[in-house]
Amino acid sequence: MGNEWHQLTDLTGDRPFVITRVRLDKSGVAIEGEFEVPPLARLTYEDQVFVSEFVRSHGSIKDMEKAFGVSYPTIKNRLNRIAGQLSPVQVVVEAPVPVAASGGDPLGMLERGEISAEEAAERLRR
C-alpha cells in the first residue's frame, strides 16, 4: 500500500484531491461519496515519512538529526515548512456532564443527541 500512496502523492503534488471511493480490504464492501483527505495525508509522501519519524522519535530533533543525517537547522526548517502546510486543527474539548445534571437537562441531552427535539420539548413543557 505504501508504494501506491507514494505514487498518488507524487501524482497529485500540491493540488487538492478528494477520495470518492473506499473499499474495505477483504470484505468486498465499498463506500462511495466524497471523503475529505486528512491534513497529514495532503503532505508529500516524503514529508509524511518525516512526520512519522518525528513522532516515533518523540519530537527529539537530536534523534531526527541522526535518522536523516542532517543538521538541527535543516530539521527545524523542514518542520516549519511542514507546519505551514497544515491548517490549524480546531480542538473541541467538552466539559464532562455531572451525573445529576445528565438526567434532568433536556437541552443538554438534546445537544448530546441523547433525545430527539420532540422529547426535549416535551420534557421542557413538564
Image (cartoon, rainbow, N blue to C red):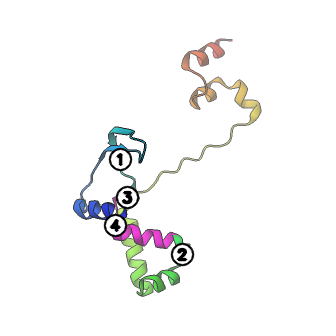
* Towards the viewer: 108 or 69: 69
Disc assigned to residue 17: none
Write the residue at 56% across / 72% down: 58
Which residue bears the numbered disc 1? 36
Disc 1/disc 2 C-alpha distance (Å):
28 Å
Name which of mark 3 and mark 2 comes first in the sequence.
3
Mark 1–mark 2 CB contact (< 8 Å) = no
Vertical side of 117 occupied by 76: above or below: below
Q: Quadrant of residue 83?
A: bottom left
* Quadrant position of the N terminus in the picture: bottom left
Which residue bears the numbered disc 2? 57
Secondary structure of residue under mark 1? loop
Magenta region includes residue 98: no
Q: Amino acid at mark 1?
A: Glu
Magenta region includes residue 44: yes
Disc 4/disc 3 C-alpha distance (Å):
8 Å
Tell me the crowding category of disc 4: few under 14, some 14 to 19, or many 20 or more residues within 10 angstroms, Cα based: many
Disc 1/disc 4 C-alpha distance (Å):
18 Å
Q: Quadrant of residue 13?
A: bottom left
Vertical side of 50 occupied by 18: above or below: above
Name which of mark 1 and mark 4 comes first in the sequence.
1
Disc assigned to residue 41: 3
Q: Position of residue 106 (x, y in %)?
A: 64, 23
Vertical side of 121 occupied by 98: above or below: below
Disc 3/disc 2 C-alpha distance (Å):
20 Å
Which residue bears the numbered disc 4? 45
* Towards the viewer: 63 or 97: 63
Write the residue at 27% across / 63% down: 7
Mark 1–mark 3 CB contact (< 8 Å) = no
Disc 1/disc 3 C-alpha distance (Å):
10 Å
